[in-house]
Image: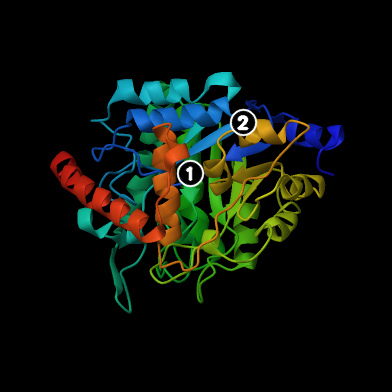
Amino acid sequence: MSGTSDSIHLLNRPLELPCGALLKNRLAKSAMSDSLANGAGDPTEAQIRLYERWAQGGVALSIIGEVQADPGFPEKPGNLVLGTGSDLKALHALASRASIEGAHIWPQLGHAGALSHAQISQPTGPSALKIGDFQCAGLTMAEVEQLPAMYARAAVQAKEVGFTGVQIHAGHGFLLSQFLSPLFNRRNDQYGGSVEARSRIIVEVINKVRSAVGPAFPIGLKINSSDQLEGGLTQDDALEVIRILDQTSIDLIEISGGTYFPGARASSDSATAGPYFVGFAQRAKSVTSVPLMVTGGIKTRDEALESLACGATDMVGLARAMVLNPELTNDWLSESGGDPDFPRFAASPPGGITAWYTMLITALGNDNESSYSLDLPTAMRIYEERDNHRCVTWKKTFS
């Protein structure tokens, strides 16, 4: 299939979302925690340049990972924050430069909940938990009821500064994903118990965001196919959630999987060859008419094409592949093609590969990836030192 005009056309077809917005091709830069904000929740020049480069590389959609609607529950101190003290000029520059060449740029609206960065937060999930060394407080009913308005305020600000849509983060073990998971969600009120009850807060968030941004502004949502944890969200439950989402005004459902629960192995660090979630997406197609995007394990153009050709997905999400080559979309839409050369690591301490890619992202934002040569231990040390420094800034800004 690779290299033929027909196959390139498959990647280059526009996709019209239910709200009427148009994605110019079928390739998206999926959300990553780029960790390039300044420690006070605002964009840096390196972060702005990073997303500008992906837009120049031809991508239809870039999603900025882990953009916080509440600075009290960040994933990392390098996250962006949408709120009352945000640098609107810098956010506008990010949105403007990342949406050139017809690209879409969406912030991924999140709340880390029980997995929020402990140095700068009080981790709080749907229920109070203590599992081994892990523990978190539980949200009160009043705090749960405030969540839809919080997401809506962030979405309105995103629209006002020029972002072309938003994605609501309900995957990878963060707060809305925790509500879906029976491992985290042990509530006995209307937000816990059955799949429908565990999905309730997500439906309320979508409805509130839609009411705030209007009918023509894209709203995406990221969901796990499963948590890949004993006692967590199963594939059958995830299919039921997607069936429920089909009744909302959502425009694009991104399917991924796994969690950042301490000790769990990230799907992105898996040694398994090939796309991870295409089989689940084929099942999901039978319960929803909402366009689907699949992210995870897609490393070659042939894998992207096959995922589209088999009808499992409408969009292909790429993350590390686009870090290795920010021009990947343009390459894959050309006759010559060319797949990224993924590095191999002799040993991978927990978090090491993520740190290595995050520091490569920093090099991309500074236009100096050609001189990037960090090994895993060095990348981890620099990454952790930078986070520790930003924690000081975060505390000063948001105390």
Q: Is residue 23 visible?
A: yes
Image location (x, y in percent) of residue 138: 30, 64
Residue found farthest to the bottom: 132
Task: Say what secondary structure mark 2 lies in.
Answer: loop
Q: In this view, does 100 lie above or below 117?
A: above
Which amino acid lies under the numbered mark 1 shown in the image of this protein?
Ile
The residue positioned 72% from the left and 46% from the top of the image is: 304
Residue 359 in the image: above or below residue 107: below
Q: Residues within 10 Å of mark 2 (few under 14, many from 20)?
A: many
Tags 1 and 2 touching, CB below 8 Å: no
Residue 127 percent across, percent down from the top left: 34, 66
Q: Is residue 73 above or below residue 135?
A: above
Residue at image mark 1: 168
Residue 160: x %, y % from top left:
40, 22
Q: Label 1, label 2: how many angstroms apart (C-alpha)?
A: 18 Å
Which quadrant of the figure contains the N terminus?
Answer: top right
Q: What element carries label 1?
A: strand
Tell me the quarter of the picture where residue 239 sits: bottom right
Of the pair 96 and 237, the residue shown nearer to us: 96
| Residue type, mark 2 in image | Ala
Which of the labelled discs sits on residue 60, or is there none?
A: 2
Q: Position of residue 22 (x, y in %)?
A: 65, 26
Q: Which of 95 and 139 is in front in this view?
A: 95
- Is residue 17 visible in this depiction of the protein? no
Q: Which of marks 1 and 2 is nearer the N terminus?
A: 2
The colour mode here is rainbow
Residue 1's disc number = none
- Using residue 267 as the reference point, say whether residue 42 is left or right of it: left
Query: In the rendered view of the protein, which quadrant contains the C terminus?
Result: top left
Q: Which of 86 and 346 is in front in this view?
A: 346
Q: Viewer-nearest of labels 1 and 2?
A: 2
